[in-house]
Image (spheres, rainbow, N blue to C red):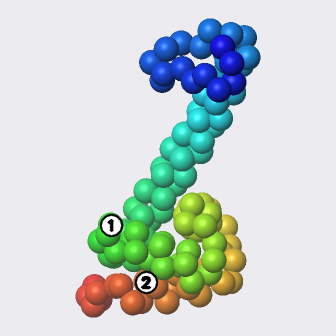
């Protein structure tokens, strides 16, 4: 098979080079999917933390995370990880602390004091 000949996606690799190339591609996709799954889980958990502690809806929890990420130029998944660590006692970086509080106050409804 020459380099200009392309096989269809349904046909299996036929040479060692093609097998190696496909294996590398599959491994790279696998790493990306694992990272995406872990990132998504952290974001979902952080939304849960914001929902409970901030007394906001899950949709507002996502909006708070998104706004915090955008306003601080920190990836959404990283903001989520910091928030999860904070929920377990770690200190939030000052920039995230301030922006999370600002975003929460923009989206929190009126609170009823017990």
For mark 1, give the secondary structure: helix
Q: Nearer the viewer, residue 72 or 109?
A: 72
Quadrant location, the C terminus: bottom left
Q: Nearer the viewer, residue 4 or 89?
A: 4
Q: First in sequence: mark 2 or mark 1?
A: 1
Task: Determine the image quadrant of residue 112.
Answer: bottom left
Residue 76 appears anywhere in the view = yes
Q: Are the two marked residues, 2 and 1, in contact with CB atoms closer than 8 angstroms?
A: no
The image shows residue 45, relative to residue 62, as above or below, that is above
Badge 1, how many Cα within 10 Å: few under 14, some, many 20+?
Answer: some
Mark 2–mark 1 Cα distance, whole angstroms, equals: 12 Å
- Residue tagged 1: 58
Residue 86 appears anywhere in the view = no
Q: Residue at x 41, y 89 (%)?
A: 105
Label drawn at residue 101: none
For mark 2, give the secondary structure: helix
Q: Residue at x 48, y 23 (%)?
A: 9
The image shows residue 3, relative to residue 48, as above or below, that is above
The image shows residue 78, relative to residue 10, as above or below, that is below
Label drawn at residue 104: 2
For the image, the number of numbered tags is: 2
Residue 52 spot, x, y in % from top left: 37, 68
Task: Determine the image quadrant of residue 92.
Answer: bottom right
Residue 109 spot, x, y in % from top left: 28, 87
Badge 2, how many Cα within 10 Å: few under 14, some, many 20+?
Answer: many
């Amino acid at each position: 098979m020459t380099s200009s000949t392309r096989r269809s996606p349904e046909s299996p690799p036929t040479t060692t080079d093609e097998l190696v190339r496909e294996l590398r591609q599959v491994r790279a996709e696998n790493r990306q999917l694992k990272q995406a799954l872990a990132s998504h889980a952290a974001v979902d958990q952080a939304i849960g933390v914001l929902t409970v502690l901030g007394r906001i809806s899950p949709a507002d929890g996502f909006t708070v995370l998104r706004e915090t990420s955008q306003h601080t130029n920190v990836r959404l998944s990283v903001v989520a990880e910091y928030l999860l660590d904070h929920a377990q006692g770690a200190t939030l970086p000052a920039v995230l602390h301030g922006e999370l509080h600002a975003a929460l106050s923009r989206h929190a409804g009126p609170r009823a004091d017990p």
